[in-house]
Image: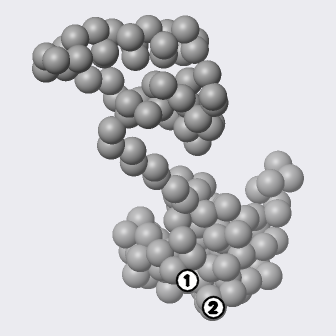
Amino acid sequence: MADETLQEIRLLAEADPDGAPLFSVILCGLPSLRERLLAPHLFPFWRRLRPRVTLTGLRREELPAFLTHHLGKDGLARFETPAALDVLFEQARGLPALVRDRAEDCLKSSPKGTLSAPQVAEILDRIEAA
């Protein structure tokens, strides 16, 4: 979306300051959208945005519950140690979709038994190289 379009949206939203707003604008995007809206020339638009919700990546302590939700208790239990989960978390950079996909990749690559930290690292390195 061009900066000019964002400016026009702001002007339309402010067309009748005494009346009820004519419409609402919902913006959803990657973190780069927030950075862009914080640019000095778009600050008038930014300051008029009311609720601001920012979704971030997972925190490390959220990883077991996240994996239990997506893989079940048995799936989580396959990661032998907290160190194996650390490797998964770090290589997926805490991004929920990437964490889930990489965890599933690890489980598929080694269909039986538990996965140690070195095994997880090897599987993920192999995936990255492909």
Q: Which circle marks residue 78 in the picture? A: 1
Left or right, 98 with reference to 49: right
Q: Which circle marks residue 95 in the picture? A: none
Q: Secondary structure at mark 1?
A: loop
Quadrant where the N terminus sits is top right
> According to the image, label 2 marks what residue?
81
Label 2 and label 1: CA atoms lie apart by: 9 Å
Residue 64 visible in rendering: yes
Residue 126 location, quadrant = bottom right
Q: Nearer the viewer, mark 2 or mark 1?
A: 2
Q: How is the image coloured?
A: one colour
> In the rendering, at what x and y percent does residue 73 appear?
40, 81
Q: Amino acid at mark 1?
A: Arg
Residue 127 location, quadrant = bottom right
> In the rendering, at what x and y percent does residue 41 appear?
61, 22
Residue at image point 22% right, 11% down: 16
